[in-house]
Image (cartoon, rainbow, N blue to C red):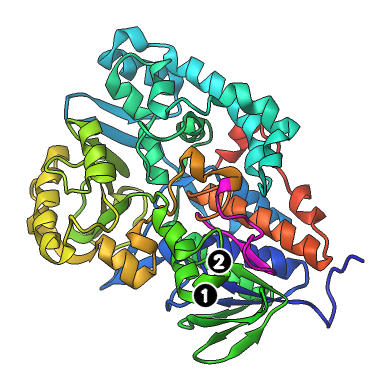
Amino acid sequence: MFKRSSSGSKRVTIVGAGPGGLATAMQLAHSGLNVTLLESRDVVGGRTSAIEKEGFRFDCGPTFFLYPRVLEEIFRSVGYELRQEVPMRRLDPQYRLTFAQGGQLDCTGDMDEMDRQIGELCRQDVGKLRRYMDDNRVKLAKFRPILERPFNSPLDLLRPSLLGAARHVHPLRSLDEELGRYFTDPRLRIAFAFQSKYLGMSPFQCPSLFSILSFLEYEYGVYHPIGGCSRVSERMAELARSMGVDVRLGEPVRELKLNGRRVVGVKTDQAEYASDALVVNADFAETMKRLVPDGLRRRWNDRQLASKKYSCSTFMLYLGIEGRYDDLPHHSIHISGDYERNLAEIESQHVLSSDPSFYVQNAGVTDDTLAPAGHSTLYVLVPVSHQHENIDWQKEADPFRERTLDALAQIGLGDLRDRIRVEHRITPDDWHCDYQIYRGATFNLAHNLGQMLHRRPHNRFEELDGVYLVGGGTHPGSGLPVIYESSRISSRLLLKDLGYRTDFIDEAALPLSAPASLAAAT
């Protein structure tokens, strides 16, 4: 029997107020469930939270807001419009790419302008981007149903949707090899493959499926929510509270209450919460080690977790500066002189590079709400190895900061040291200790073929009864749109299991062929 709401509503506890947990809370509360959301930190958002210091506001983690469609549909399914709740601006250029080997691209959705710039790098590759876009438009349409459904066993690989998509996916081809089918210039292959770093992976190792990442940027745009991506999390928490969700901050879960293999509640320092279902949005591997006895985990025990492949980590500088760099775009990515070597240093050698690639967000050129008058913010991210015995961050953090500031001179920030007024830093050790991320791997389990689909932890968790996963550690994987999608998958499963309706989730779907309407934010 289906239930919409009643005084005897089922109780659900969500562990972690990251983007997946917040989206799940909104959907479950809309269905009439009694939802409690427990967050260990004193702010919502997890890695998508805000860091505020002396009047400066920084996004902690994600700064690219891509493919708004998924979250728009979630908002619409519970009675809200995303663009009304969180104003956002489409960026043009999307970002600037600079190459230590020489050359630059101001990337834009204007295909004529992209052809002009591509011609300056390699005349032979003019027109190739349009073919790439056409092919990936078909790939996304074929693969989208796969990203929207759970995978629980190898039998799910036999679904007609997956079989129909197989010839467009080329699972044994790397992303770099896929790009080599279109572009001869190695700089251009990197320009449309570096997005694999959103998954914490190298394009030389990442499956070719993820060519859809750069396609999404050019087809649907790169956005900046006013106030930052963290503002999206904050507004979701406000809406969740208005829908009846009990959001409790600064209340880490210390223990799961078990009846055999079924979780029946959780315990914090403040209280115990009986639950008919538990949703875990915290970092998967770290949560398993901390809360679930090793003997209860067969597939995901401590030995198995240690044997898995994990994403890279990031070295972060959050800088409040005097003045503003008006000639620097909102997003800038600098590619090192030997990109393949730089990636090997991160992923296999586990050493710090002398010539790192890096990313800088200069949000002040778009959003003047993030800093005091006459000042602006710079967000600096350098991909580095996850925690490894080769790197002692107690010794390396200060020298690597200096190396990073020196490197920023390559994109015109040579006077940066003199303009810093506020500084905050996060290393892989901090990601692990302060944010409870296993090995400080900020993008979670790697997205290789052995750790995707049914080989990733399942949305309805296979080791314990009554437990559901959302976030980067489950299917479909990492990245904000994909994490939001995981919340829809897990919400459907949970609601069906408890006898609640799920039709409202699918009824809010937008037509896939309408990128122009999605791009209309200013």
Q: Position of residue 54 (x, y in %)?
A: 25, 73
Residue 360 visible somewhere in the drawing: yes
The N terminus lies in quadrant: bottom right
Q: Is residue 283 left or right of residue 345?
A: right
Q: Label 2 vs label 1: CA separation?
A: 7 Å
Find disc 2 in the rendering and name its residue: 297
The one of 376 and 238 positioned closer to us in this rendering: 238
Marks 2 and 1 in Cβ contact (< 8 Å): yes
In the foreground, 368 or 350: 350
Residue 83 relative to residue 362: left or right? right
Q: Which mark is residue 480?
A: none
Residue 121 falls in which quadrant of the image?
A: top left
In this view, 384 is above or below 470: above
Q: Which residue is mark 1?
A: 293
SS class, disc 2: loop
158 or 34: which is nearer to us? 158
> What is the three-letter code of the residue carrying label 2?
Arg
> Could you classify mark 1 by the number of other residues whose Cα lies within 10 Å: few (under 14), some (14-19), or many (20 or more)?
few
Q: Find out whether residue 461 is within the magenta segment.
A: yes
Q: Report the number of discs.
A: 2
Residue at the image position 62 percent from the left and 75 percent from the top: 241
- Residue 43 in the magenta stretch? The answer is no
Which stretch appears magenta? 455-472
Query: What residue lies at 26% left-to-right and 15% top-to-bottom?
Result: 120
Residue ID at (60%, 89%)? 272
Q: Measured from the top left, where is residue 91 in percent x and y?
A: 42, 40
Q: Position of residue 320 (x, y in %)?
A: 22, 62
* Visible residue check, residue 329: no
SS type, badge 1 = loop
Quick check: 137 above or below 242?
Answer: above
